[in-house]
Image (cartoon, rainbow, N blue to C red):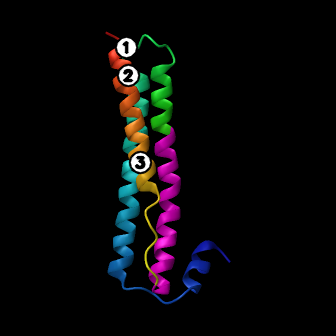
Amino acid sequence: MGWVERMRAEGSEPDPRFSFANERTFLAWIRTALAVMAAGIALETFGPDFDIEFLRPALAGLLVGVGAVIAAGSFHRWLNSERALRSNRPLPAPRLAPLLAYGVALVAVLGVVAVLLAR
């Protein structure tokens, strides 16, 4: 039995509006992940050279890595939310939100450091 059948075996079919809202949230996380990864690729491809040689690839790699984790985690979040909807339980907490917030904040701080060191 595949994951779809296992998921549908739990609880009852939720109101389609809730399932569609859950799917839109999943797609928003995917768009966010793509944007973060694109920013990392753009930084590595078009970004300035910093005095610290490894800084640009490190920032770019961090962005791409954060985006990849968000993309992978978004499906897990969608599946857990769908299971909660089917079982009439509270929705799970968005565990991806802190990763995104702290990951982007870390890149921003490192970017500020890089700009200040380039002067």
Query: Principal SS element in the magenta part?
Result: helix
Quarter of the rendering containing residue 26: bottom left
Which circle marks residue 73 in the picture?
none
Check contact, mark 1 vs mark 2: CB within 8 A: yes
- Vertical placement of residue 42 versus 75, above or below: above
Residue type, numbered disc 3: Leu
Report the mark closest to the observer, 3 or 2: 2
Question: Is residue 28 part of the magenta span, yes or no?
Answer: no
Q: Which residue is mark 3?
A: 100
Q: Say whether residue 22 is visible.
A: yes
**Sequence-first disc among 3 and 2:** 3
Quarter of the rendering containing residue 45: top left
How many C-alpha atoms fall within 10 Å of the one at disc 2: few (<14), some, or many (≥20)?
few
Residue 10 as seen in the image, left or right of residue 30: right
Q: Which residue is mark 2?
A: 113
Residue occupying image coordinates x 47% and y 67%: 78
Distance CA(mark 3)–CA(mark 2) = 20 Å
109 or 28: nearer the viewer: 109
Residue type, numbered disc 1: Leu
Q: Secondary structure at mark 2?
A: helix
Q: Secondary structure at mark 1?
A: helix
Residue occupying image coordinates x 35% and y 78%: 18
Q: Residue furthest right?
A: 1
Residue type, numbered disc 2: Val
Residue 79 as seen in the image, left or right of residue 18: right
How many C-alpha atoms fall within 10 Å of the one at disc 3: few (<14), some, or many (≥20)?
many
Q: Which residue is mark 1?
A: 117
Question: Is residue 82 part of the magenta span, yes or no?
Answer: yes
Q: Quadrant of the N terminus?
A: bottom right
Residues in magenta? Answer: 65-88
Quarter of the rendering containing residue 117: top left
116 or 9: nearer the viewer: 116
